[in-house]
């Protein structure tokens, strides 16, 4: 008698996000619509929620037809990120198409000899510091194909390269010490000294990045020994280099390649400096990538028409990611149209009022984690939740710095878990959601415990403004 084996089939990423979209649409019929009053804060220039101003409003459920319309609205609403992804991806992949990337990696491996095993850990900490210091997140999308290519060349797999970029940036962003998009806004609303409590957050950052480095490299070394154990084994990554480590080592690094790599590094320095010193964001950074994509193409003797053809061909590989970004954004569109985000904030905050300080701090953390599904924007979540959390913290006798820490943890770490953000990351990398969760799911479980431990420590030491 033979026993049939049932194989569980994971749905397409569109279906997973679509299912979430349907659930959120149903929620607009079940959860009462409500709103907080909002006023402009002169210190930040943002519209802040007025505590104790919540009121129920007329129910505005999203109809099935409007739900499908929200997909188009989500695409339009996320257009800046979508097209930034195209241009940053085009710039990075141009290096691969002209051969500069492969030759450069080969030269790097030759120079490091048997020390190439340190390349990925170094990159992990560099990207982590970028997220922790000046709040890099979406800006890192363009690095994904390059580091994925490096990982494959070193004998690892594509998801290792994607994790080095997006995992490091996400965890650096979550455990940041001077992030202007989260910490600065939250502490300003809480009326705390700017970037106060720095030492504690540095400890959190070092702990988090150490765990992540060990986790990634443990997986990477396992894949190097047996490629069939890769979570993306059998997947095709057409835009990436297909050369082996040995083939890259034998490549000649020509003068054109050297000039291209110098231009690459100058581009990175320019956009990092622009982001830090002048507040450049997607529009300015896209312009830089467009310009330098053409410059690198011309340096490598490509005509303007050839560069355009290369860009079009490269763009085919990001179409999937573009649609996932738009569909994921449609979830937020539905929640906003149904006016239920403020209601969720209000009732979750109300449920904390009778808790002890330790449990209340933990509840704040889990509240922010849940809220990050509804409001994936760090700054958007800060101006929505912190005006509620600050007076609640005062009422419960919790230091305001702890309320800011709960926001920071809840907003940041769950970005690698909630599909509203994770779907965007894995789509850009060309990795399906099920394989993304196989890699990041256990890690998020570990980090959840780490966050709980640090929240308990923060309450125990009365983590304060200094």
Image (cartoon, rainbow, N blue to C red):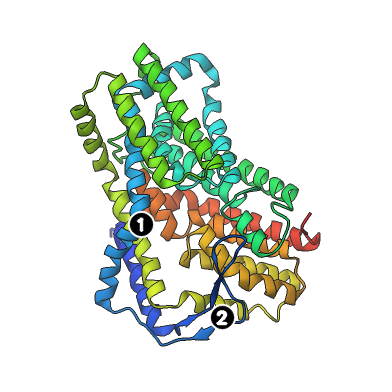
Q: In the rendered image, which quarter contains the N terminus?
A: bottom left
| Residue 387 falls in image quadrant | bottom right
351 or 231: which is nearer to us?
Answer: 351
Pointer 1: what residue? Answer: 78
Residue found at x 64% / y 64%: 189
User: In the image, 194: left or right of 138?
Assistant: right
Q: Mark 2 Cα within 10 Å, few/some/many (few <14, many 20+)?
A: few
User: In the image, 388: left or right of 297?
Assistant: right
Residue found at x 31% / y 51%: 322
| Residue 395 falls in image quadrant | bottom right
Pointer 2: what residue? Answer: 347
Image depth: mark 1 or mark 2 in front: 1
Give residue 317's position: percent from left, percent from top.
27, 42
Q: Mark 1 Cα within 10 Å, few/some/many (few <14, many 20+)?
A: some
Give residue 129's position: percent from left, percent from top.
59, 40
125 or 40: which is nearer to us?
Answer: 40
Residue found at x 18% / y 29%: 305
Q: CA distance from mark 1 to mark 2?
A: 29 Å
For mark 2, give the secondary structure. helix
User: In the image, 6: left or right of 134?
Assistant: left
The disc label shown at residue 250, or none: none
Residue 112 is at least partly visible in this image: yes
> Total number of numbered labels?
2
Compared with 137, 407 (above or below) is below
Give residue 255's position: percent from left, percent from top.
37, 12
Asked if the residue under mark 2 is in contact with the one under mark 1, i.e. CB atoms within 8 Å, the reply is no
For mark 1, give the secondary structure. loop
Compared with 375, 391 (above or below) is below
362 or 36: which is nearer to us?
Answer: 36
Give residue 453's position: percent from left, percent from top.
70, 58
Compared with 413, 167 (above or below) is above
């Amino acid at each position: 008698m033979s026993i049939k084996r049932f194989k569980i089939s994971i749905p397409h990423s569109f279906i997973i996000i679509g299912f979430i979209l349907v659930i959120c649409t149903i929620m607009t019929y079940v959860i009462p619509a409500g709103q907080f009053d909002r006023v402009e804060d002169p210190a930040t220039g943002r519209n802040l929620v007025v505590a104790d101003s919540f009121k129920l409003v007329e129910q505005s459920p999203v109809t099935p037809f409007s739900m499908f319309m929200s997909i188009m609205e989500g695409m339009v609403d996320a257009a800046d990120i979508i097209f930034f992804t195209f241009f940053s991806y085009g710039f990075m992949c141009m290096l691969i198409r002209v051969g500069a990337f492969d030759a450069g990696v080969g030269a790097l491996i030759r120079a490091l000899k048997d020390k190439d095993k340190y390349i990925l850990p170094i990159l992990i900490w560099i990207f982590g510091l970028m997220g922790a210091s000046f709040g890099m997140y979406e800006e890192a999308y363009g690095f994904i194909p390059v580091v994925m290519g490096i990982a494959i060349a070193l004998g690892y797999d594509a998801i290792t390269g994607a994790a080095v970029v997006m995992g490091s940036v996400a965890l650096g962003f979550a455990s940041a010490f001077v992030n202007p998009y989260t910490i600065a806004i939250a502490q300003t609303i809480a009326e705390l000294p700017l970037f106060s409590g720095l030492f504690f957050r540095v400890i959190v950052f070092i702990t988090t990045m150490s765990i992540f480095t060990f986790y990634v490299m443990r997986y990477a070394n396992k894949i190097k020994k047996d490629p069939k154990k890769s979570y993306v084994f059998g997947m095709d990554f057409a835009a990436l280099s297909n050369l082996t480590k040995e083939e890259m080592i034998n490549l000649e690094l020509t003068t054109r390649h050297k000039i291209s790599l110098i231009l690459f590094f100058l581009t990175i320095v320019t956009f990092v400096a622009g982001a830090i010193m002048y507040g450049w964001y997607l529009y300015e950074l896209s312009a830089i990538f467009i310009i330098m994509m053409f410059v690198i193409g011309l340096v490598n003797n490509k005509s303007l028409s050839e560069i355009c053809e290369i860009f079009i061909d490269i763009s085919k590989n990001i179409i999937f990611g573009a649609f996932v970004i738009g569909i994921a954004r449609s979830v937020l569109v539905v929640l906003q149209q149904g006016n239920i985000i403020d209601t969720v904030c209000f009732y979750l905050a109300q449920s904390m009022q009778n808790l002890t300080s330790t449990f209340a701090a933990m509840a704040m953390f889990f509240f922010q984690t849940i809220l990050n599904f509804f409001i994936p924007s760090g700054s958007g979540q800060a101006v929505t939740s912190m005006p509620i959390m600050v007076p609640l913290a005062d009422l419960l006798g919790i230091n305001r710095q702890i309320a800011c820490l709960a926001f920071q943890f809840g907003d940041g770490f769950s970005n690698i878990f909630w599909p509203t953000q994770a779907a965007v990351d894995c789509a850009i990398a060309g990795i399906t959601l099920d394989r993304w969760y196989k890699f990041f799911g256990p890690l998020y479980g570990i980090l959840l415990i780490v966050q709980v431990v640090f929240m308990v420590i923060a309450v125990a030491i009365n983590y304060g403004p200094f």
